[in-house]
Image (cartoon, rainbow, N blue to C red):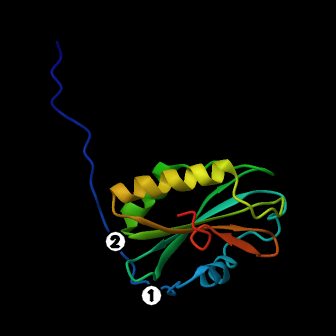
């Protein structure tokens, strides 16, 4: 029988950039910032999911365009969202996605995935601060303001 002497090695490397991103204090600040990252040419056609990563002081570390989908859905992978947060040392996240239909009412799937990310984040001390639904005119629905978090 062959003896395994080697195992896969994981090497962690952290190369931070000194980023003094803006401090996001409320959903309006978040939305104003996210306008820079949404593809406005396709907001009425495809769902886009953006994740804002923040430090403890609510300063932006970075924004990740997580997925782009179809007219009424897209894939949201909790492991990728939280794995990215761990890798960059984020302590808070804000989720956002658009509804091409223009309906700013969270679906059952929106509520479920937000809860799932929040619960998983809690285990790792990563706080989900808000989840914004936006339409192509940048009207929004805030989960935090509406008691959904």
Q: In screen coordinates, is 111 left or right of 138?
A: left
- Residue 17 sits in quarter: bottom left
In the image, residue 133 sits, relative to residue 8, either above or below, namely below
Label 2 secondary element: loop
Q: Residue, x 56% and y 70% (percent of image)? A: 144
Q: Residue, x 57% and y 51% (percent of image)? A: 113
Disc sitting over residue 90 in the figure: none
Tell me which label, 2 or 1, sits earlier in the chain. 2
Label 1 secondary element: loop
Residue 61 image point, x, y percent: 46, 76
Residue 141 image point, x, y percent: 69, 70
Label 2: how many Cα within 10 Å (few below 14, some 14–19, many 20+): few
Q: Residue, x 34% and y 71% (percent of image)? A: 15
Disc sitting over residue 15 in the figure: 2
Q: Which residue is mark 1?
A: 20
Residue 104 image point, x, y percent: 76, 64
């Amino acid at each position: 029988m062959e003896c395994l002497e080697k195992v896969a090695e994981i090497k962690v490397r952290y190369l931070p950039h000194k980023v003094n991103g803006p401090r996001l204090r409320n959903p309006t600040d978040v939305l104003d910032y996210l306008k820079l990252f949404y593809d406005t040419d396709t907001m009425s056609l495809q769902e886009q999911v953006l994740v804002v990563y923040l430090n403890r002081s609510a300063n932006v570390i970075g924004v990740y365009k997580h997925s782009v989908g179809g007219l009424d859905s897209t894939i949201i992978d909790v492991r990728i969202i939280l794995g990215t947060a761990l890798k960059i040392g984020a302590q808070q996240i804000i989720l956002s996605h658009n509804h091409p239909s223009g309906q700013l009412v969270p679906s059952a799937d929106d509520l479920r995935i937000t809860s799932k990310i929040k619960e998983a984040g809690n285990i790792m001390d990563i706080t989900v601060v808000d989840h914004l639904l936006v339409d192509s005119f940048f009207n929004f629905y805030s989960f935090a303001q509406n008691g959904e978090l």
